[in-house]
Image (tube, rainbow, N blue to C red):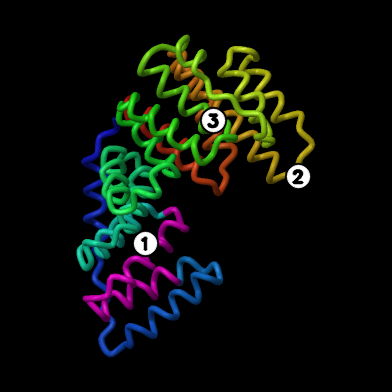
């Protein structure tokens, strides 16, 4: 687990008071939502912050700010905004879920699990969908709980190699790699490159080099090729972690995060994992 003190201290340092005297909070919030929909996330965050300052009772405004900061990958600011929203409306369960995502991306996995649990207590119908909680459980060392979460996720998403792999990773820690391989969830319809080879890697049927080779050999456009290389290196790294090879884990996480940055949630997971490793050095 990474040290949490410096990150939590940075949250406090973001506490900038915005004055918006005389401004119309509903109008500012409407503008924030409009520019957010247009993909102007920095502007949306600024307008939502002004709306929040103009109306100290509004929980919608800091929630919108948090969502915009999340799009900007400014997770410290997102946590602060969602915390403000929850102070103004403690029953705003979705803010716990969103803040949990930001905590996870910051490597604050214990805090992420706590927020996800609060959200799911209020919205139990979403429990099977919540693979993100399973990832957070893996990183706090609650491996059997993580295994159960990914088994539960299978009920709504049975053809996802990533779910199978994270189930394996938790199971390998809770029991053994041999048992995890025997329990590997079968998947036949995940056509993303190189997911077929990733599953075969954890089944013990191909080598890490073959997974990486499949990503390189695929005839894809530039962005899809980068994504394939990212996922190949991420899951090769996680495979090496399950085998206890710290050097290879770090090597392939660095490749995934630093060379093949993509806009997907799993890049943030890989980045948080790499930061955790570097902090331990």
Quarter of the picture holding the C terminus? top left
Tag 1 residue: 66
Q: Which mark is residue 221?
A: 2
Q: Position of residue 195 (x, y in %)?
A: 64, 30
Residue at 45 percent across and 19 percent down: it is: 241
Q: Which residues are magenta?
A: 44-73
Q: Earlier in the sequence, mark 3 or mark 1?
A: 1
Q: Are marks 3 and 1 in contact (CB under 8 Å)?
A: no
Q: Position of residue 150 (x, y in %)?
A: 44, 32
Gap between marks 1 and 2, in whole Å?
Answer: 33 Å
Instruction: Provide residue 25's location: percent of width, then percent of height.
Output: 32, 83
Q: Considering the numbered disc 3 on the image, is that residue within a helix, a strand or a loop?
A: helix
Q: Is residue 239 above or below residue 148?
A: above
Could you give the CA–CA distance between mark 3 and mark 1, rounded to whole angstroms? 28 Å
Which residue in the protein does label 3 denote? 234
Is mark 1 in CB contact (under 8 Å) with mark 2? Answer: no
Label 2 or label 3, whichever comes before in sequence order: 2
Q: 166 or 103: which is nearer to us?
A: 166
Residue 278 visible at all: no
Label 1 packing within 10 angstroms: few (<14), some (14-19), many (20+): many
């Amino acid at each position: 687990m990474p040290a949490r003190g410096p990150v939590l201290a940075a949250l406090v340092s973001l506490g900038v008071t915005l004055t918006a005297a005389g401004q119309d909070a509903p109008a500012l919030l409407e503008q924030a939502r409009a520019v957010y929909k247009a993909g102007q996330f920095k502007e949306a965050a600024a307008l939502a912050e002004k709306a929040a300052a103009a109306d100290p009772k509004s929980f919608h405004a800091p929630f919108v700010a948090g969502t915009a900061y999340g799009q900007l990958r400014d997770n410290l600011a997102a946590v602060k905004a969602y915390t403000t929203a929850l102070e103004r409306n403690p029953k705003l369960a979705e803010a716990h879920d969103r803040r949990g995502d930001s905590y996870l991306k910051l490597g604050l996995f214990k805090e992420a699990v706590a927020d996800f649990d609060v959200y799911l207590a209020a919205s139990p119908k979403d429990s099977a969908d919540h693979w993100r909680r399973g990832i957070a459980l893996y990183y706090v060392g609650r491996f059997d709980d993580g295994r159960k979460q990914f088994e539960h996720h299978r009920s709504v998403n049975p053809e996802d190699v990533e779910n199978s792999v994270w189930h394996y990773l938790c199971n390998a820690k809770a029991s053994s790699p041999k048992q995890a391989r025997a329990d590997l969830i079968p998947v036949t319809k995940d056509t993303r490159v190189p997911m077929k080879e990733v599953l075969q890697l954890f089944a013990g049927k191909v080598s890490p080099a073959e997974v990486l080779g499949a990503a390189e050999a695929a005839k894809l456009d530039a962005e899809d090729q980068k994504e394939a290389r990212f996922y190949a290196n991420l899951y090769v790294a996680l495979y090496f972690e399950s085998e206890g090879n710290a050097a290879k884990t770090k090597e392939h996480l660095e490749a995934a995060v630093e060379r093949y940055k993509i806009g997907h949630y799993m890049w943030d997971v890989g980045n948080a994992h790499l930061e955790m490793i570097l902090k331990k050095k």
